[in-house]
Image (cartoon, helix red, strand yellow):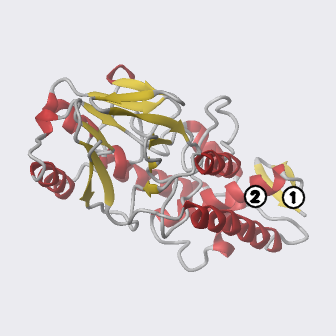
């Protein structure tokens, strides 16, 4: 099976996104990049180098529904006329903006984020959401764990790998144990545990760190030989990445707990201490709060921190 990486620029600090063309019938794209003129041109050129145009694509498979990965799905689908789009049912970013759900606003207020700052975050992500065209649920096909995406000379098996987002998926070519896993595994950075409602109970926060650790163990069990991520270069030593990720989470847990004072702290206050150098820079503030909430919840679930709610704000205590 011939799978070709195509580098597509993004306007985000994470840099270029990796799109993958499966040069097998049916011609398939794994992710597509954001909806910007630069990304359209880069994707079009990358496909042309393989003798392929948007019109030739028959299937679009999304690792997850963040703008840098799914933004051009509708553009490519419309150009191809009959291309199918696949995404896990637990993803929502392709349906509406990242902070458009009322539950997310409620989570931020419970985290101690001032109303004015919540409004700023919402406004910022309204702009970010312009980097993808909203899709209707009727436009989509569902990805499911262990599902086989069949091609002329083989298949890719779907692995549901939640953590970065609830519906994040990876794809394995089992004949050579090669993985394509979006933002689940990245060589030089640890994926952000993005704040999201739990797909089973939307009134609760998704347990992103616990789920991410389970997903890493699931990928480890496949004994991958090569991992192609959504950003940066491929990973050839998954064991090193696995241990680095687990160690990083453990170290961040210890740091978070050490920053909790005797009188307690909310997630917004913790984020300001944990990420003092970048806390007020654009989307970084939301990402910082997301990570603070995720680590506080993880420590609470492990019995390392207590949690109480007063005046609608959640405070964590040792």
Instruction: Identify the mark nearer the N-term, 2 or 1.
Output: 2
Looking at the picture, tell me which residue is in the foreground, 310 or 292: 292
Q: Secondary structure at mark 1?
A: loop
Asked if the residues shown at circle 2 and circle 1 are in contact, with their CB atoms under 8 angstroms apart, the answer is yes
Instruction: Name the residue at the front extreme.
Output: 175
Q: Would you identify the image quadrant in which residue 124 lies?
A: bottom left
Looking at the picture, tell me which residue is in the foreground, 81 or 309: 81
Give neighbour class at mark 1: few <14, some 14-19, many 20+ (Cα, 10 Å). some
Instruction: Name the residue at the bottom extreme.
Output: 277
Q: Residue at x 15, y 48 (%)?
A: 47
Task: Reply above or below: 313 against 258.
Answer: above
Q: Residue at x 33, y 58 (%)?
A: 17
The C terminus - image quarter: bottom right
Q: Is residue 33 visible?
A: no
Q: Would you identify the image quadrant in which residue 31 lies?
A: top left
Report, in whole angstroms, how far the alpha carbon at label 2 lies from the one at label 1.
Answer: 8 Å
Looking at the picture, tell me which residue is in the foreground, 219 or 34: 219
Q: Residue at x 47, y 71 (%)?
A: 281
Residue 61 position within the rendered picture, expressed as x and y whole percent measured from the top left: 35, 36
Which residue carries the number 2 mark? Answer: 296
In the drawing, what numbered circle is on residue 88? none
Task: Reply above or below: 87 against 252.
Answer: above
Which residue carries the number 1 mark? Answer: 305
């Amino acid at each position: 099976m011939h799978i070709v990486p195509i580098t597509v620029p993004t306007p985000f600090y994470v840099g270029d996104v990796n799109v993958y063309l499966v040069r097998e019938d049916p011609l398939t794209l794994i992710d597509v990049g954001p909806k910007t003129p630069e990304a359209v041109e880069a994707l079009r050129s990358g496909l042309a180098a393989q003798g392929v145009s948007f019109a030739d694509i028959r299937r679009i498979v999304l690792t997850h529904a963040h703008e840098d990965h799914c933004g051009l799905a509708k553009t490519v689908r419309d150009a191809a006329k009959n291309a199918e789009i696949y995404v896990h049912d637990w993803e929502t970013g392709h349906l509406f903006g990242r902070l458009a759900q009322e539950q997310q606003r409620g989570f931020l207020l419970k985290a101690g984020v001032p109303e004015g700052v919540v409004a700023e975050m919402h406004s910022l992500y309204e702009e970010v959401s312009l980097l993808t065209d909203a899709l209707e649920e009727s436009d989509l096909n569902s990805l499911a764990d262990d599902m086989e995406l069949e091609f002329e000379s083989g298949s890719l098996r779907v692995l549901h790998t939640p953590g970065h987002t609830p519906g994040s998926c990876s794809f394995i070519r089992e004949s050579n144990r090669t993985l394509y896993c979006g933002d689940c595994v990245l060589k030089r950075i640890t994926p952000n545990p993005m704040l999201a409602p739990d797909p089973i109970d939307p009134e609760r926060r998704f347990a992103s760190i616990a789920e991410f650790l389970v997903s890493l163990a699931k990928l480890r069990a496949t004994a991958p030989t090569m991992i192609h991520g959504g950003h940066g270069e491929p990973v050839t030593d998954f064991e090193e990445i696995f241990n680095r990720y687990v160690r990083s989470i453990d170290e961040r847990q210890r740091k978070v707990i050490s920053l909790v004072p005797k009188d307690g702290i909310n997630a917004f206050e913790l984020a300001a201490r944990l990420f003092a150098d970048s806390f007020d820079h654009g989307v970084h503030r939301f990402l910082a709060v997301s990570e603070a909430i995720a680590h506080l919840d993880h420590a609470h679930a492990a019995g390392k921190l207590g949690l109480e709610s007063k005046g609608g704000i959640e405070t964590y205590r040792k």
